[in-house]
């Protein structure tokens, strides 16, 4: 295994306001919340911190506002060992904010999330232009869809042109231009996003999913030029299809879910670390599933992300 993989994350930084309640309010209804917490988050920051907590050398490229939330988000990332030198501080726009409602009712946990993009959507081509000459320093580039699509495509092309693998998490879902897909080494939707991308519903019953249907969905994305498609299937685990073959890894059983927030991000951070540190694809999927299992057993986004020793 490599001593320390180098990962570049280009993506979002948010501050999360999380409120826990017994039941979600209906339209026009007011309910009493049980607890409210503030934590750093954002898909990009979550994935960066998770990889850093496992020991990767992680550089974050993104944007925050010139405000207290921005200072808070950067401090949490720095504390985890993420290099935030290239996170731009934007004037006249607020740091991204997520409001997360967490329903804990009869042992079932669900969340509903509203995201205000703020500075994340203010990233410009000039902000990432330096990567054209430096992107070859990294073993993997990780991106999501909480920043402008044009920025993702520019960075993906920079990486592709230098032979650097690119991992794109298709969340929150937005249609991908066909032009970006050939640049992608890994396209990672969850089952809902895979359906939006392909029109194919992947049947799932608890801890099992129809993998033949998942493969058909993956084949549509692969036909557009992606090298690998990694579909996360919630409690049914994850499946990868691509030029290296087909792999399936079940989710960890017996885990008491407390908060699903950031489970997908921790999976991606774990997989990114594992695949760049020398693990096989099969090992990386199992490692990522274990990472997500720990995350759902705790509350919050970044506060729930495990270290290597905890895993």
Image (spheres, rainbow, N blue to C red):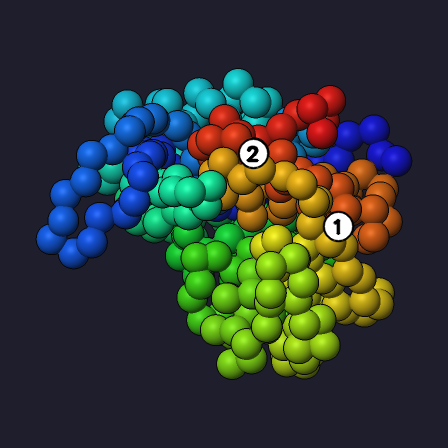
Residue 145, given in percent of the width and then of the height, sits at 46, 56
Q: Which mark is residue 170?
A: none
Residue farthest along the left direction in this orientation: 28
Q: Nearer the viewer, residue 206 or 241?
A: 206
Q: Is residue 208 above or below residue 53?
A: below
Q: Nearer the viewer, residue 97 or 147?
A: 97
Q: Nearer the viewer, residue 79 or 237?
A: 237
The crowd level at tag 1 (other Cα within 10 Å; few <14, some 14-19, many 20+) is many
Query: How far apart, in angstroms, are the residues tagged by discs 1 and 2?
Result: 19 Å
Residue at 51% x, 53% y: name it: 144
Determine which residue is flagged by label 2.
Answer: 297
Q: Earlier in the sequence, mark 1 or mark 2?
A: 1
- Residue 111 visible to an observer of this rendering: yes
In the rendered view of the protein, which quadrant contains the N terminus?
top right
- Helix, strand or loop at label 1? It is helix
Q: Which mark is residue 285?
A: 1
Residue at 52% x, 30% y: name it: 298
Q: Is residue 91 toward the left or the right of residue 240 in the image?
A: left
Q: Is residue 28 above or below residue 23?
A: below
Residue 201 lies in quadrant = bottom right
Residue 19, given in percent of the width and then of the height, sits at 30, 34
The crowd level at tag 2 (other Cα within 10 Å; few <14, some 14-19, many 20+) is some
Residue at 64% x, 80% y: name it: 220
Q: Is residue 77 above or below residue 176?
A: above
Q: Are marks 1 and 2 in contact (CB under 8 Å)?
A: no
Residue 51, given in percent of the width and then of the height, sits at 65, 35
- Helix, strand or loop at label 2? It is loop
- Residue 64 visible to an observer of this rendering: no
In the rendered view of the protein, which quadrant contains the C terminus?
top right
Q: How many marks?
A: 2
Residue at 66% x, 66% y: name it: 209
């Amino acid at each position: 295994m490599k001593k320390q993989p180098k990962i570049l994350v280009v993506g979002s930084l948010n501050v999360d306001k999380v409120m826990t309640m017994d039941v979600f309010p209906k339209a026009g209804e007011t309910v009493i919340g049980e607890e409210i917490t503030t934590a750093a988050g954002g898909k990009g920051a979550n994935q960066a911190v998770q990889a850093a907590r496992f020991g990767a050398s992680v550089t974050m490229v993104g944007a925050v506002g010139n405000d207290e939330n921005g200072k808070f988000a950067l401090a949490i990332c720095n504390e985890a060992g993420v290099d935030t030198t290239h996170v731009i501080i934007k004037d006249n726009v607020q740091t991204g904010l997520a409001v997360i409602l967490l329903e804990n009712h009869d042992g079932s946990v669900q969340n509903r999330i509203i995201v205000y993009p703020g500075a994340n959507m203010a990233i410009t081509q000039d902000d990432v232009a330096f990567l054209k000459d430096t992107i070859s320093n990294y073993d993997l580039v990780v991106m999501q869809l909480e920043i402008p699509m044009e920025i993702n495509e520019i960075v993906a092309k920079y990486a592709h042109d230098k032979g650097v693998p690119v991992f794109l998490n298709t969340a929150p879902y937005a249609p991908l231009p066909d032009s970006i897909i050939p640049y992608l080494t890994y396209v990672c939707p969850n089952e809902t996003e895979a359906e939006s991308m392909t029109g194919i519903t992947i049947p799932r019953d608890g801890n099992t999913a129809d993998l033949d249907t998942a493969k058909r969905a993956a084949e549509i994305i692969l036909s557009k030029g992606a090298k690998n498609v990694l579909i996360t299937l919630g409690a049914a685990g994850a499946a990868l299809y691509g030029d290296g073959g087909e792999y399936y890894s079940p989710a960890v059983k017996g885990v008491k879910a407390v908060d699903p927030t950031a489970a997908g991000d921790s999976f991606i951070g774990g997989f990114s670390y594992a695949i760049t540190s020398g693990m096989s694809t099969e090992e990386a999927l199992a490692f990522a599933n274990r990472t997500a299992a720990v995350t759902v057993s705790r509350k919050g986004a970044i506060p729930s992300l495990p270290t290597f020793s905890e895993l």
